[in-house]
Amino acid sequence: MFSKACVYGIRASIFIASQSLKQNRVGLISIAENIQTPEAFTAKILQQLVKHGIVDSVKGPAGGFQIEKKRINDIKISEIVDSLEGNDIYLACGLGLKNCNSSKPCPLHDKFAAIRNNLKYMLESTSLYELAMGVDIESTFLKR
């Protein structure tokens, strides 16, 4: 359902948030290793997250990526998805048809609309803090 860039962006944001909760700033190599993603691709995704204000980038020898601790609970997963995918995920056809709509629906249109609505609700109601805490207490994991 999500593009590879979006999945990596969510994983990177969760990892950065979990480290930021411990007052740690993390570098690109550490992020890519801990979420098992290619460095160059991860760097491009992080640029987008910085551009959209999800993640902060600090330059220099003690630099890296972080999220202000007080902001982590305010960031919803939908913001990360929107910054990397736009709102297409909430509008796209389940069969990938370009002209699918309510007046000319594909065979999955009505059933998939309900799934999209549930997905939107879940992403808008889930905070980055909630997911980062799961990683922090090791009840959830980012590595395969």
Image: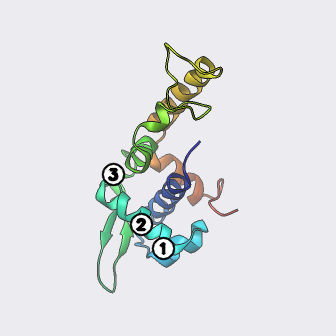
Mark nearer the N terminus (3 vs 1) = 1
Three-letter amino acid code of the residue under disc 3: Arg
Q: Which numbered mark, 3 or 1, is in the foreground of this view?
A: 1
Residue 88 horizontal/vertical position (percent): 44, 37
Q: Which mark is residue 71?
A: 3
Please identify the residue farthest to the right as the structure is shown. Answer: 144
Q: Which mark is residue 49?
A: none
Which residue is identified by label 2? 44
- In front here: 22 or 19? 19
What SS does tag 3 mark?
helix
Query: Quick one: label 2, few (<14), some, or many (20+) residues within 10 Å?
Result: few
Q: Which mark is residue 40?
A: 1
Query: Quick one: label 3, few (<14), some, or many (20+) residues within 10 Å?
Result: few
Three-letter amino acid code of the residue under disc 2: Lys
Q: How far is disc 3 from disc 2 in space, using C-alphas?
A: 23 Å
In which quadrant is the C terminus drawn? bottom right
Relative to 44, residue 71 above or below: above
Query: Quick one: label 1, few (<14), some, or many (20+) residues within 10 Å?
Result: few
Q: Which numbered mark, 3 or 2, is in the foreground of this view?
A: 2
Relative to 106, residue 85 above or below: below
64 vs 19, left or right, is left
What SS does tag 1 mark?
helix
Residue 67 in sight here? no
Mark nearer the N terminus (3 vs 2) = 2
Q: Residue at x 33, y 86 (%)?
A: 61
Q: Residue at x 40, y 68 (%)?
A: 23
103 vs 142, left or right, is left
Three-letter amino acid code of the residue under disc 1: Ala
Identify the image quadrant of residue 32: bottom right
